[in-house]
Image (cartoon, rainbow, N blue to C red):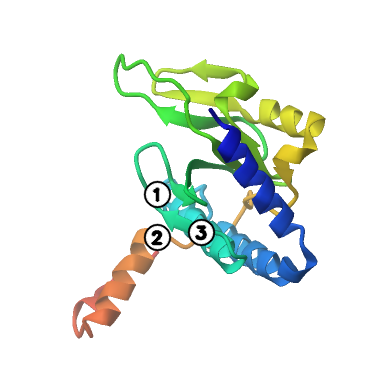
Amino acid sequence: MFKKARESFKKIRATFYDDKFYEHVREFEIALQKLITEYNTSNWENRFVVGGALEILFCALLKSTGHKCKWINEQRYDLEINNIKFSIKSNFTGKGDIRLINVLGDEVVQWMEPTLFFISEVGICYADPEMHLETKSKRDALTVDTKHIKRLVENHDEWLIKIRIPRKPQHSEKIKTASYDVTKAILEEIDSNYLSKHLPEI
């Protein structure tokens, strides 16, 4: 069932390790560092924005290295890469649980998606349900512990792309807030005369 997704990941892996794309990958790493540092996900609202921005940046990286990629932003899938749909998950602490699927009420859910996990200080890890990772059902989500993904790629490094995924800062002097920056951008676009002078301080 996941043969094509696994083959696609291996092609991506080979591309990213090709010296001619070194600068492409490096630019992605620099952009991701800036994103995670400036929009620290310690601020709850930044979590959704950073997740979306990561998907867009990764899609741009794939396209720049010759892969077909679409940002589809569906309920269970985020990117369509070389005609295969993938879910994208991230963990910027390098430990703890990753939410695979959000659960509503008594809904019963099952992990069915080939997934790319972006894990701080590890890299990009591929996993799918046929790799028998242990998952847990919590009150509002189906989760997987980061340590199980790490163990998988330690034993089978063909499912790991070693790329710099930074750890989010524990202490930031100033954290940008996505909603504030969106507001400022909108006011600049409409040439605001009044509201822009009276934005609340953050």
| Front-most of residues 127 and 93 | 127
Residue 19 appears anywhere in the view: yes
Mark 2 lies on residue: 178
| Front-most of residues 107 and 182 | 107
Q: Earlier in the sequence, mark 3 or mark 2?
A: 3
Q: Is residue 94 above or below residue 60?
A: above
Q: Position of residue 11 (x, y in %)?
A: 67, 50
Q: Is residue 5 above or below residue 138?
A: below
Tag 2, which secondary structure? helix
Does residue 125 appear to the left or right of 59 in the view shown?
Answer: right
Q: Quadrant of the C terminus?
A: bottom left
| Front-most of residues 96 and 86 | 86
Q: Which mark is residue 68?
A: 3
Residues at circles 3 and 1 in contact by the CB criterion of under 8 Å: no
Q: Earlier in the sequence, mark 1 or mark 2?
A: 1
Q: Which amino acid type is shown beneath numbered disc 1?
A: Glu
Residues at circles 1 and 2 in contact by the CB criterion of under 8 Å: yes
Q: Which amino acid type is shown beneath numbered disc 3?
A: Lys
Q: Quadrant of residue 38?
A: bottom right
Q: Position of residue 89 (x, y in %)?
A: 53, 41
Tell me if mark 2 has few (under 14), some (14-19) or many (20+) residues whose alpha carbon lies within 10 angstroms of its own. some
Q: Is residue 23 above or below residue 111?
A: below
Label 3, label 1: how far apart the Cα atoms are: 30 Å
Mark 1 lies on residue: 45
